[in-house]
Amino acid sequence: MVCDPEFAELGGPAVPSAAASSLCMATARNCLNGRRRRRCAFTVIELLVVATVISLLIALLLPAVQAARESARRIACGNKLRQIAMALHQYESDHRLFPPGSQVQDFAGPHPYSKSLGWPIALLPYLEQGALYSAFDTHLDAQIHNRIQTRRSVPIYCCPSDPNSGVTEWKSPSIDPFWGDYWAGSWGTNNYLGVSGVNGWQSTAQPTACNIVAEKPDGTGLHDGMFFGNSAVRFADVTDGTTSTLLLGERGVTLGWGKWGGPGVVNACPMGIADVVLPGVVDGFEKSGGLRPAIGVLDDRGYWWSWHPQGTHFAFVDGSVQFRWYETDRRVLFDLSTRTGRMQD
């Protein structure tokens, strides 16, 4: 059968025009449906093109999502630092001075060590952690006699960008059983350390002998910051001005350092160093300390750094929080680390 009437004149079978038209339309629909059925599947090339486009979109979108998440974590981290600074203001208002960087008292015995209760413990009631503070026996050492408490994580002391924050299990580098028990085990971590000034790391015979180091002939002692062993600093002592003196800084938890209830370096000044306090810079000690990215070595404990790109947070005595870049001039950080107007040449 021929659908074209003109073809019928050439010898094709005659078909009524109306019937021919209907039959031709049905045939066309069948042909079209057949083509559609045959085109339901993608070719391999089409699938490869689609997969490539999706991969490119994911590659472009994923960094943006990660950057947005880190931006949110960075904001949360800075807000925690601001809350701690405000809690320190309330503490100073109630006690007429800031808490000591670490309360130090010598213990007698075969292993010389000190009772150490860092400022994060004293501040617990001002951070809605009154029950935890009440569980401490403040007449005894925080690390040996209060380890049940210091094993706990205090979320306000943990920066959300730090993958090591929370509760970390550390091993002791010492083979001595006493020091093994003293250092090893679970600890709650701390990302926010008090600024002790512009000196540190000098060892002394006893932890409470920091005054010997502080009374150096050139007057550059250890007591020119806000937090140190047995410190008792008031707002009135900040002669530099509260807007230009560092109170706290952020540093990553690293290689066993960064415990909110930790002792820091035993028998060193200022007491609590590398766990709860840290110098802004270290003057006269191979120019160490200050700001730099972490490089995965033990020396990271003595520098200010974070898991945020390009820098870390600092809180000033007035309660403001600023993000400082690693490129910050060392002399600027030196000046900000002291409350007494000292400048580095």
Image (cartoon, rainbow, N blue to C red):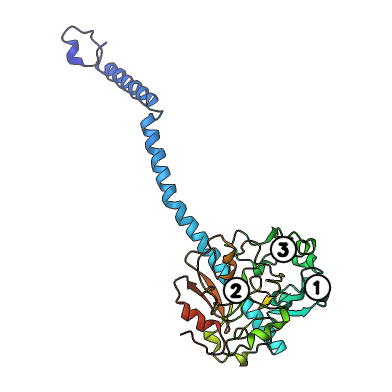
- Residue wearing tag 1: 136
Residue 79 shows in the view: yes
Instruction: State which tag comes first along the sequence, 2 or 3.
Output: 2
- Between the residue at mark 2 and the residue at mark 3, the CA separation in whole angstroms equals 20 Å
Frontmost of labels 2 and 3 is 3
Q: Is mark 2 on a helix, strand or loop?
A: helix
Classify 10 Å Cα crowding around label 3: few (below 14), some (14-19), many (20 and above).
Answer: many
In the picture, the disc for residue 81 is 2
- Between the residue at mark 2 and the residue at mark 1, the CA separation in whole angstroms equals 24 Å
Residue at (69%, 90%) from the top-left corner?
A: 96
Taking depth in this image into account, of 104 and 24 the one nearest to the observer is 104
Is residue 193 left or right of 186 when viewed as pictured? left
Taking depth in this image into account, of 253 and 256 the one nearest to the observer is 256
- Residue wearing tag 3: 187
Classify 10 Å Cα crowding around label 2: few (below 14), some (14-19), many (20 and above).
Answer: many
Q: Is mark 1 on a helix, strand or loop?
A: loop
Is residue 113 left or right of 17 when viewed as pictured? right
Q: What element carries label 3?
A: strand
In the figure, residue 41 lies in which quadrant? top left
Image x and y of residue 131, in percent: 79, 72
What's under tag 3, amino acid-wise? Trp
Is 293 above or below relative to 27?
A: below
Image x and y of residue 5, in percent: 20, 15
Image x and y of residue 149, in percent: 78, 67
What's under tag 1, amino acid-wise? Phe
